[in-house]
Image: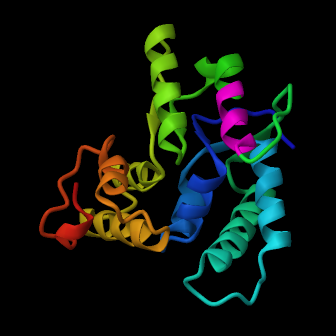
Amino acid sequence: MSETRYPILADTSALIAVAMSDYWTTATTTLKLTTTNICRNELQRHVRENHEYAHDGTREHRLHHGSKRVLEAFDDSDAAFSTVTVVPAPSGEDAGEISIETEIEQHGSAYQVICINDVAARNRLQKRQQETGMSYRVVPPTYLLYVLFDTGELTKGEFCRGCAAMMEGENWTTKGAIYEMWRAIPVDCSGYIDDDFLP
């Protein structure tokens, strides 16, 4: 494990969502990402506890294969991906999210982007960012595709379709969830994707 802190800190769900997108290979060669040891443990647990041969499109399939892809990338010495150890180590169902919050409390100035799926956790981190004056942005998983678009790795069409596919694949399809996935993204995807996936 490396204690290098790259500019983007991402949680388990965000990493899985991007790993299951069509642009994971581009992400692994472009993004500089950090996660916590607790999130890494969650990824390992998803690989163990979800069947490799689960039906394509099921949550079990996404958890197993997405987690496996993420772990492979973190083990690849060519990828700028690192894992940091969080102390004290949280436990329980929300341990990954809590570990991200703990890492930010202790090393917030090391990050430019905090990518976390849970809305309540994002709101807590945004509130903390406003209170402390730190300069990081707190964003949803779709923002990682925006970074690829913003750096010229994806066309606008690829970006928009990638976001819609991510929302559909992860079942983030309620109006509230869709709104949250676009909240930090300054791109109008009208005309590129179905209106059902627009805020």
Image coordinates of residue 101 in percent, x first then y, are 65, 29
Q: Is residue 147 above or below residue 189?
A: above
Image coordinates of residue 50 in percent, x first then y, are 77, 75
Image coordinates of residue 108 in percent, x first then y, are 61, 21
Q: Is residue 114 above or below residue 51?
A: above
- The quarter of the picture where residue 161 lies is bottom left
Q: Residue at x 54, y 43 (%)?
A: 116
Q: Is residue 29 left or right of residue 41?
A: left
Residue situated in front as seen by the camera: 119 or 14: 119
Q: Is residue 87 visible?
A: yes
Q: Residue at x 68, y 20 (%)?
A: 107
Residue found at the far top of this picture: 132
Residue situated in front as seen by the camera: 68 or 122: 122
Pick the quarter of the image with the N terminus.
top right
Q: Is residue 22 left or right of residue 36?
A: left
Q: Is residue 77 visible?
A: no
